[in-house]
Image (cartoon, rainbow, N blue to C red):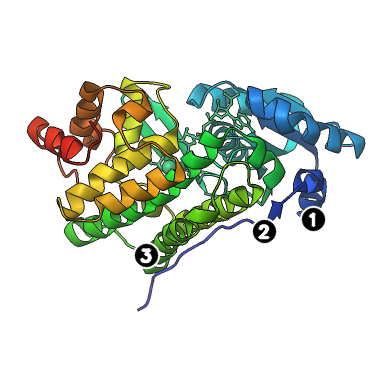
Amino acid sequence: MFDKSTWIRLPRNVVIGHGVLGQTLDAVEELHLSGRPLVVSSPTPHAVAGEKVVDQFAAAGYDPAEIVIEEASFDAVQRVIAHAEDADAGFAIGVGGGKAIDITKMAADDLGLGFVSVPTAASHDGIVSGRGSVPEGDTRHSVAAEPPLAVVADTEILAEAPWRLTTAGCADIISNYTAVRDWELAHRLKNVPYSEYAGALSQMTAEMLVENADSIKRNLEESSWIVVKALVSSGVAMSIAGSSRPASGAEHLFSHQLDRIAPGAALHGHQVGVGAIMTEYLHSGPNGRWRDVRDALGALGAPTTAEDLGIDRETVIEALTTAHEIRDRYTILGDGMSEEAAIEAATVTGVV
Ligand SMILES: NC(=O)C1=CN([C@@H]2O[C@H](COP(=O)(O)OP(=O)(O)OC[C@H]3O[C@@H](n4cnc5c(N)ncnc54)[C@H](OP(=O)(O)O)[C@@H]3O)[C@@H](O)[C@H]2O)C=CC1
Ligand SMILES: O=C(CO)COP(=O)(O)O
Ligand SMILES: [Zn+2]
């Protein structure tokens, strides 16, 4: 008997373009959500876009509630849940970078509320995904969460955000190359379920971004357009897979470990990019494609070395040798790298 089944949850409205923040109300009203909106953001996104979203809903007679969170943590999720309950919110709108969007989607999931994603930076591919990523103690959880019913990505806002946030988004996408390699490896070695569609979409997204690298330039709004479309596509790949596997392999384990041992050193996307140079080296050897990964990152202005990330050699080696411990996800790191091998990989690739 054929007994396979899958349930792919995708957004219904994806609105991308210049000035579309002003259409947030329309994008939401199309969804037939009811009740009071809760607008969740972090400090800068609140000033850049959150207040405008609140004003838009207030002008339409909605009486929006709002909350500003400072960090990505389970405590922040609980604060948003409590605030939503007190305010008797009917749906949640996450306005910000990865932090605000992840927290909102997890709180909305817990409360069974509809969730709308309004990115203020093209810095990460959680814009569309049905995953939330939160550190806790020595580990990091990638949990299934409410995917957005609608995404409103205003390229004018994204283009005005600091350029480093856009290069972080590019690097998060480029890391899909190694993430898919790790996923295929885990499938072959550990029988981890693999989706051809999700793998192909994730890889193609990275290829298209690299092919369009010449059009990705500072002060050019078209750059935000190209990058945010790739981020949406990568998020869709995660939704098809039902896990972050198409976009998160050993390079992400390296970055998550850096978040623990060198908190706040660099942006998520920049860390996974540098991680991808080294894990590509581990996959394909000294004459493999790690130079292509490095050159693609370099051409886009993303970090390619530990110095660019603002971390020292010892931190890189510690993160590499302990990254496999962060979660139960089989990758090219296997059951851990020796210190000698980590030094070799980081040195040959010029990361240290
Ligand atoms: N769920 C998923 O599938 C994924 C989740 N992630 C998660 O997302 C997070 C990384 O996302 P990232 O966006 O880098 O992190 P943040 O949300 O922390 O944003 C990075 C910085 O950019 C600032 N910022 C955001 N928008 C603007 C703007 N328009 N102008 C000026 N500054 C702005 C933020 O300000 P402020 O400090 O005021 O907030 C913050 O300082 C990580 O926690 C990562 O794990 C990443 C990829 C996928
Ligand atoms: O960052 C992500 C994909 O780019 C999410 O992956 P994680 O599941 O590793 O948090
Ligand atoms: Zn990522």
List the residue tagged with mark 3.
195
Please indicate whether residue 59 sits to the left or right of residue 198 in the image.
right
Q: Residue at x 77, y 52 (%)?
A: 27
Q: Tell me, yes or no, if residue 180 can be seen here.
A: yes
Task: Return the mark for residue 170.
Answer: none
Question: Residue 100: which quarter of the image?
Answer: top right
The amino acid marked with disc number 3 is Ser
**Quadrant that contains the N terminus:** bottom left
The amino acid marked with disc number 2 is Arg
Q: Residue at x 17, y 35 (%)?
A: 347
Please indicate whether residue 204 sits to the left or right of residue 48 in the image.
left
Task: Return the mark for residue 12.
Answer: 2
Q: Position of residue 329 (x, y in %)?
A: 27, 45
Q: Secondary structure at mark 2?
A: loop
Q: Tell me, yes or no, if residue 331 can be seen here.
A: no
Please indicate whether residue 39 sits to the left or right of residue 179 in the image.
right
Q: Residue at x 28, y 44 (%)?
A: 277
Task: Return the mark for residue 30.
Answer: 1
Q: Position of residue 168 (x, y in %)?
A: 47, 39
The amino acid marked with disc number 1 is Glu
